[in-house]
Amino acid sequence: LIMDFITEDVQAFNIVEQPSFITLVKGPAPNRSFMCYEMLTEQVERAYENVKAKFEGMRTFYTAANIWIAGRSFLGIVVHWLDSSSLECYSVALACCRTKGHAYDHEEVRAAFRIHSKVCCTITNNGSNFIKAFKEFADFQKAEGDMQASEDEEEDAIVFLDLDQISATHTLHLVATKDSHDYLSTGPLALKKLFWSIIAKFSALWNSVKVIAEKAKTQLIDPNVTRWNSFYHAYSKSQNTPEEVLHDLCDCLNLKRLREIELIFLNGNCHMMKSLACALDSLQGESKCFIGFLLTTISALQKKLEAMKYSLKFATPLGNAILRVLQKRFDIYFEDHSLIIANDLICLCSAPEKESKECGGAQ
């Protein structure tokens, strides 16, 4: 348990020697023996070797990488693979280390676990510096390989495969947050005024959670800017609050009441965002979501938004804007042959089950 805590929380190993930590752990059982620094190091080394041995029998992996640059830079890498018999998806965190060069550090970690030749792709977010680092490193490797092709050297070659696969969920996240917000805040003047009026009123409500808790006997969600669905849930919670309660809250806080047109706009916006939120939840599944579901999910989302934009007041401009952005951002995915093949395979695998259900319903 101590090793799990230290590795999963990325704690320094010498924490086991801190008196306060020892007191905390030994509190419930003072006579129990305690793990020292040397024992912890040995267990981590053993776990590291076990993971490498397990990877020996695997044929294909893909990795996900992310980087944090606030203060000191850290690179996090997770490896994923499918069990050949159950088709269950498994994952292991490989590293969370200080970084100087995104791509080279990533390759170092893969080489340490001896999976550098088995990784089919690496998924990153849409950060341009991350993608550029991978591309420049891959181009450098190719150029260096061309120059040294005629030389008989025995040095180990670094294999750097196609790593320009950006995260589709992060792309959809940008549609749900940045693109929709940009359109509403800079679009047609009437829509922009309506949007900023709602933002101002709800910002004041979110900043007065104590009054809301006392008056409405409930709590509105205070949105967190670091989470993709935070504003959607905050608006949805507010939209589900009875209209008279919202009016009372505005009166209590000396705010202008929400107008009927603003409530109608909020309702349409929440329905639009709900479709995006459901698609994101589907694509972010850990064990049962495969790459073959991507094109089907995006196509279904486009059809849903197309039908919805005419049934909700004030939703048509936003619906058209989101559909344009979806087409712009995801067109490249629909031209990817590997994604098309994966989509067809998923359709073939699910066809017998679907046919069986339809036959059962008919009977």
Image (tube, grey):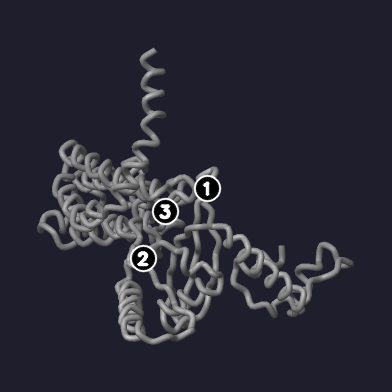
Tag 2: amino acid: Asn
- Which badge, 1 or 2, comes first in the chain's sequence? 1
Give the class, few, some or many, for how many residues have Cα within 10 Å of label 1's Cα (few <14, many ≥20).
few
Percent across and percent down for residue 199 are: 27, 58
Using the image as rendered, state which of residue 171 and residue 160 is in the foreground.
160
Q: CA distance from mark 3 to mark 2?
A: 27 Å
Q: Which mark is residue 125?
A: 2
> Looking at the image, is 181 positioned above or below residue 245?
below
* Mark 3 / mark 2, whichever is N-terminal: 2
Rate crowding at label 3 as few (under 14), some (14 to 19) or many (20 or more) other CA atoms within 10 Å: some
Q: Position of residue 172 (x, y in %)?
A: 30, 55
Residue for badge 3: 221
Can residue 119 be seen in the rendering of this structure?
A: yes
The residue at 41%/58% (across/down) is 222
The residue tagged with tag 1: helix, strand or loop?
loop
- Tell whether label 3 touches label 1 (CB within 8 Å): no
Q: Position of residue 228 (x, y in %)?
A: 37, 58
Q: Quadrant of the N terminus?
A: bottom right
Q: Which mark is residue 84?
A: 1
Residue type marked 1 = Ser
Which element carries disc 3, helix, strand or loop?
A: loop
